[in-house]
Image (cartoon, rainbow, N blue to C red):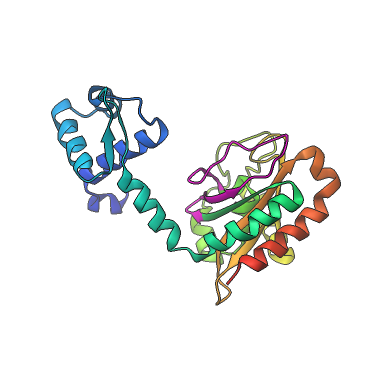
Amino acid sequence: MAETDNYQVPAVRRAYDVLDLLAVEPGRHRLIEIAKRLEVNKSSMFALLHTLESLRLVEKNGDGRYALGSAIGALGSAFVRQYDYIAAFRREAHAAAAAYGATFQLARLEGREVVYLAIEEALAPIRLAASPGIRLPAHATALGKVLLASLDGAALDLLLQEEQLGASSTPYTITSRERLLEQLETVRAEGIAEDSQEAVLGICCAAAPVRDPSGRVVAAISCSMSVFEWANRREEIRQAVIATAARISG
């Protein structure tokens, strides 16, 4: 057990587990089903759900099934507002998605994962099954490579301690630490990263960093399209991503 686990509050962890379950499966579970899924006795779960409901973090519909409450929406909006670049992304990426007929994403790094903050989709034959809040392994995405490349050596070593990076998302996913580090050197030199079907089969991406006024990398944007389009438009999309990221940066 990690040393920091000694300072965790079990009740808070349990409340998070409830919210996480309802986020994935909204409006599907009643009290007893939630208690069984999370292996908590019914009386304790009743008290927890009652508390969450009183705080508007969850709500119960007419047939006793629970979903996330309105306070979650307010908290989510507050989360978005604290990052000024999300509004800039929406403005710039909306125009870029329409101009290039491709999907643009904004993400930040959390540990060894990228978390999607916003997405602007184009009207295209192939659409990505992604939405804000989705997490993907950083090493499997162009977004993640850009963000990992921005870290100093000590921070990167802390995140990538094992030679093998974990399960692969597709047959093309990089699983070797050594190979990833080689790619990160290229990303630093070129200021842009790519993934070629490494996160999703049939999809290629290019990503570039978003910087704050001091020049620090705070997020990354990417553009995704089918592997068939990518073969003919790779350089065009790389330049579009670099230019869009520069306009979003503070």
Side (left or right) of 72 relative to 160: left
Q: In front: 68, or 106? A: 68
The residue most toward the front is 62
The residue most toward the right is 232
> Residue 151, image x and y in percent?
56, 64
- Which quadrant does the C terminus fall into? bottom right
- Identify the residue at image location x=36%, y=38%: 20
| Visible residue check, residue 210 | yes
- Identify the residue at image location x=51%, y=55%: 109
- Identify the residue at image location x=34%, y=46%: 72
Reply above or below: 121 against 149: above
Q: Quadrant of residue 65?
A: top left
Tag count in the figure? 0
Residue bounds of the magenta highlight: 109-137
Q: Is residue 239 magenta?
A: no
> Residue 76, image x and y in percent?
39, 51
| Visible residue check, residue 1 | no
Q: Quadrant of residue 33?
A: top left
> Residue 138, image x and y in percent?
57, 49
- Which quadrant does the N terminus fall into? top left
Reply above or below: 171 against 224: above
Q: In front: 58, or 24? A: 58
Q: In front: 211, or 136? A: 211
> Residue 237, image x and y in percent?
77, 54
- Identify the residue at image location x=32%, y=44%: 70
Q: Is residue 127 magenta?
A: yes
